[in-house]
Amino acid sequence: MTALVLAGCRPEPLGSYLKALGVFRLVASQADRTATAWWDSDRSCLDSALARDDLVEFLVESYQPTPVLSPWNKDAGFKETSSTATTTLLRIEATEDPRFNAYRQAILVVRQLRARPDWQTLSKQDQVALLRNSLPDAALDWLSASIVVGPERLVYPAVLGTGGNFGRFELSPTSWTASCGFSIRAQRVAPRAAPGLSPPCSTKARRAYEEMRRGSSTRGRLAVSAPQPPGKGPR
């Protein structure tokens, strides 16, 4: 096992705290089920079978993004009109990268449901209930975190706004942009499925990856800590 300090993941602000939990969740669910994590003062620590370079390679090349879809919202990428969200969603559908299989399966289900003649006449609560009963398990994590189907009304956990959006700011397309920037390789995009789209893997994202590989990145840098976690174990 290798103990690492995730210098870019701190208890504050909240986004940084959640980033630390996200890294641990991904490693523990997809790379090493025996992984443990804890806080050492204001530093996030991770102990797993992944050494520093292995962790970077896993996050950039191997991890499978959790489907984050909010089709109950108006500007969540499923409209027929052209938008950044719609374009990014097409890129995810077009890539042949097997890491996005769960995303593509979930998107297919959503499109089938939205094609129903009665979709637009359903209440938001009925749409969410139908999605919960139809989406593959991999897509239910986000649905359960962002919106709860109560007996009489929908309930929104405040940390994710009102069902995955804060006003007109949609969280799901923001998540797609981050995933596309680091995860969808340009050479794997199928032009036939998304004509006219520019390569989704941005120069900025690739440069950041190379900096992380060299250890010269000042954002989210990983530093090897003491060989073993504190004696009291994970906390």
Image: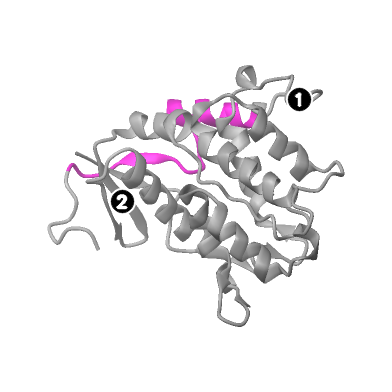
Q: Tell me the quadrant of the picture where the C terminus can be found.
A: bottom left
Total numbered circles: 2
- At 55% from the left and 46% from the top, the residue drawn is 67
- At 48% from the left and 31% from the top, the residue drawn is 60
* Residue denoted by label 2: 45
Vertical position of residue 54 compared to residue 108: above or below: above
Which one is earlier in the sequence, the residue at label 1 or at label 2? Answer: 2
Q: Quadrant of residue 127?
A: bottom right
Is residue 13 visible in the rendered image? The answer is no
Q: Amino acid at mark 2?
A: Cys
Q: Position of residue 93 (x, y in %)?
A: 65, 33
Given this view, does label 1 or label 2 mark the residue nearer the observer? 1
* Residue 21 sits inside the magenta stretch: no
Left or right of 191 in this view: 152? left
Vertical position of residue 89 compared to residue 197: above or below: below
Vertical position of residue 51 compared to residue 152: above or below: above
Q: Which mark is residue 198?
A: 1
